[in-house]
């Protein structure tokens, strides 16, 4: 059985849990390219976090909102480091506890606090709606931030009369070394990547920002709107890309595993299986699948097969194939095409998949499906 992502190259832009996501993708057969689009700066020694924590001791909040597991744990760990961890937990325990998702909920419980309420959608929007259903005039609400301010969330609570205390546990920043991300960006623009994954909105914004600085934003957007599939862990993550009309695959459950499973469906669905030369052929990113067997291809072989597969059954001249190789960066004449076709046939393990049409060129001999006629005649 072919691994669902065998033959595809998938880019990972995450900083946190990148190894976990990469392993999940590799276990499904993908080739993984990693270029972190951001980094997390912990604020355990930050004066503002300490000031906010002491404020919570002096005037305990009525409501506590945990938005991320790593952030809530970081807050408690920082308080422990200052010697006020126990006092902070005592101040938070009587409050109405809310958690955006299961990881934040788990972090709250792990701290020894009562089990918090959590929205089924795991979204800030539903959490906010839940709060706004209550009378909030004069209510003190501590909101643990997750890498960046939440102005819309906090402003809506303030408009309802609440006193909002924002808790900045960590923040996102650009990578200290952008080399890996620049390489990833160039590969996407060159269409050498089949899919790009995003697990946070700042990562998506970070890639767009880098492309703008390197003056290749239009190339990036053209790739992401076309041959390169975008996969986002949730709609919030997708927002910076949606603003640029970039479509994305978004799983129903906002989890890494669900993200990978969505890719396992979406990527193969983009490449139809063709009945060619008595075999079943599917063209993937850097490989072909012949009768369920993955056949790795060289860059030249992938270029040739990609051109032939664009119009299966039609003859493509040697001149056109040579031009396609030149556009991909491989100097070639018609004689070089013949050699490249011979190597492609060997790589496919079935010479009949690429048929020579004498004095005209080459084609994929598309066969009729059932009683239907051929899609194209030579």
Image (cartoon, rainbow, N blue to C red):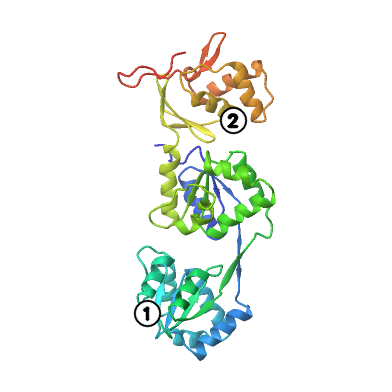
Answer left or right for 357 relative to 278.
right
Figure check: 125 above or below 291: below
Which percent across, then down, holds residue 59? 49, 89
Callouts 2 and 1 close, C-beta under 8 Å: no
In this rendering, the answer to whether 299 lies above or below 209 is: above
**SS of the residue under disc 2:** loop
Which quadrant does the N terminus fall into? top left
The outermost residue toward the bottom is 58
Tell me how far mark 2 sits from mark 1, CA to CA: 57 Å
Q: Residues within 10 Å of mark 2 (few under 14, many from 20)?
A: some
Q: Is residue 324 above or below residue 201?
A: above
Q: Counting residues from the N terminus, which is met first, the one under dot 2 or under dot 1?
A: 1
Q: Nearer the viewer, residue 78 or 196?
A: 196
Nearer the camera: disc 2 or disc 1: 1
| Residue matched to label 1 | 114
Residue 285 in sight here: yes
Q: Residue at point 42% right, 68% down? A: 100
Extreme-left residue of the structure: 371
Name the residue carrying label 2. Answer: 298
Q: Residue at x 61, y 59 (%)?
A: 38
Q: Is residue 36 visible?
A: no
């Amino acid at each position: 059985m072919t691994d669902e992502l065998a033959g595809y190259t998938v880019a990972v832009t995450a900083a946190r849990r990148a190894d976990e996501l990469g392993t999940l993708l590799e276990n499904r057969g993908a080739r993984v390219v990693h270029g972190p689009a951001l980094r997390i700066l912990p604020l355990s020694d930050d004066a503002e976090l300490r000031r906010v924590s002491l404020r919570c001791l002096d005037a305990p909040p009525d409501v506590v909102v945990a938005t991320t597991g790593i952030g809530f744990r970081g807050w408690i760990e920082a308080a422990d480091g200052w010697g006020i961890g126990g006092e902070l937990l005592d101040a938070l325990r009587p409050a109405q506890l809310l958690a955006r998702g299961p990881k934040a909920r788990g972090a709250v419980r792990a701290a020894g606090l009562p089990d918090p309420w959590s929205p089924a959608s795991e979204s800030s929007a539903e959490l906010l709606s839940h709060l706004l259903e209550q009378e909030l005039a004069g209510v003190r609400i501590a909101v643990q931030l997750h890498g960046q301010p939440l102005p819309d969330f906090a402003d809506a609570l303030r408009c309802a009369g609440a006193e909002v205390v924002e808790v900045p546990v960590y923040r996102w920043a650009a990578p200290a070394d952008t080399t890996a991300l620049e390489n990833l960006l160039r590969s996407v623009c060159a269409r050498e990547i089949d899919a790009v994954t995003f697990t946070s909105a700042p990562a998506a914004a970070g890639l767009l920002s880098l492309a703008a600085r390197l003056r290749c934003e239009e190339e990036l957007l053209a790739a992401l709107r076309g041959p390169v599939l975008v996969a986002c862990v949730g709609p919030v993550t997708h927002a910076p890309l949606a603003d640029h009309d970039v479509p994305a695959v978004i799983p129903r459950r906002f989890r890494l595993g669900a993200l990978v499973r969505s890719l396992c469906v979406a990527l193969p669905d983009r490449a139809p299986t063709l009945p060619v030369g008595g075999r079943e052929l599917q063209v993937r990113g850097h490989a072909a699948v012949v009768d369920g067997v993955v056949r790795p291809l060289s860059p030249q072989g992938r270029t040739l097969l990609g051109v032939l597969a664009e119009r299966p059954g039609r003859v493509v001249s040697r001149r056109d194939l040579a031009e396609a190789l030149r556009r991909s960066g491989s100097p070639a004449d018609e004689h070089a095409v013949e050699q490249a076709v011979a190597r492609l046939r060997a790589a496919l393990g079935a010479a009949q998949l690429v048929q020579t049409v004498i004095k005209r060129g080459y084609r994929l001999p598309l066969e009729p499906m059932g009683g239907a006629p051929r899609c194209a005649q030579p």
